[in-house]
Image (spheres, rainbow, N blue to C red):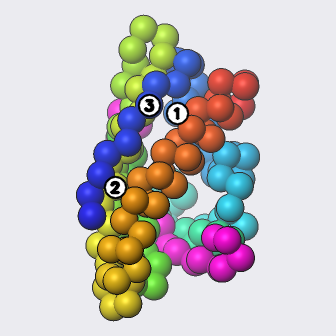
Amino acid sequence: MKYTCELTINAPRERVIELFDNPDNMKKWQPDLVSFKHLSGTPGQPGAKSELVYNMNGRKCEMVETVTERALPDRFCGTYDAKGCHNIIENRFEEIGGQTRWTMVSDFRFSGMMRILGLLMRGSFPKYSRKMMNNFKAFVERGG
């Protein structure tokens, strides 16, 4: 399942990247995030792995992020692996007259029982992505 979400943040790209690139900020705009722990590699660089733990409606969801590309301020890409789910995300940032257009392309690939759940909950994945993007936008626009 592949989809694209896009929004414009009322802040210069340099500021958006500064806030986006700091893992300490993640809990400020991802309320479901319980913990973020670096596992291996140079943090934020290609090949780096981190564990993210979320509380999704009372259920613990653990995933491993692997940074696949770091070409900031233009692009940041990674994979996110959880039980039965592999997600490839490409984040693009474009400066537009003092504002920043953030485009996120997500490609979810499910296996096992998650294939059924993925089909049943197809609409919830882009909805959740948009919600997190809007949370980040609000975080940046309130001054980070």
Mark 3: which amino acid? Leu
Per the picture, the main secondary structure of the magenta-coloured stretch is strand
Of circles 2 and 1, the one toward us is 2
Mark 1: which amino acid? Ile
Out of 123 and 81, give the one closest to the viewer.
Answer: 123
Q: Which residue is mark 3?
A: 7
Tell me where the magenta segment starts and ends, as one range.
56-74
Judge whether residue 116 is colored magenta: no
Q: Residue at x 55, y 18 (%)?
A: 10
Callout 3: few (<14), some (14-19), or many (20+) C-alpha neighbours within 10 Å? some
Helix, strand or loop status at disc 1 = helix
133 in relation to 116, above or below: above
Q: Which residue is mark 1?
A: 17
Outermost bottom residue: 112
Mark 2: which amino acid? Ser
Out of 73 and 86, give the one closest to the viewer.
Answer: 86
Callout 2: few (<14), some (14-19), or many (20+) C-alpha neighbours within 10 Å? many
Marks 3 and 2 sit apart, C-alpha to C-alpha, by: 15 Å
- Identify the disc placed on residue 106: 2
Callout 1: few (<14), some (14-19), or many (20+) C-alpha neighbours within 10 Å? some
Outermost left residue: 2
Judge whether residue 57 is colored magenta: yes
Q: Position of residue 107 (x, y in %)?
A: 29, 61
Q: Quadrant of the N terminus?
A: bottom left
Residue 47 in sight here: no
Q: Position of residue 89 (x, y in %)?
A: 36, 55
Helix, strand or loop status at disc 2 = strand
Helix, strand or loop status at disc 3 = strand
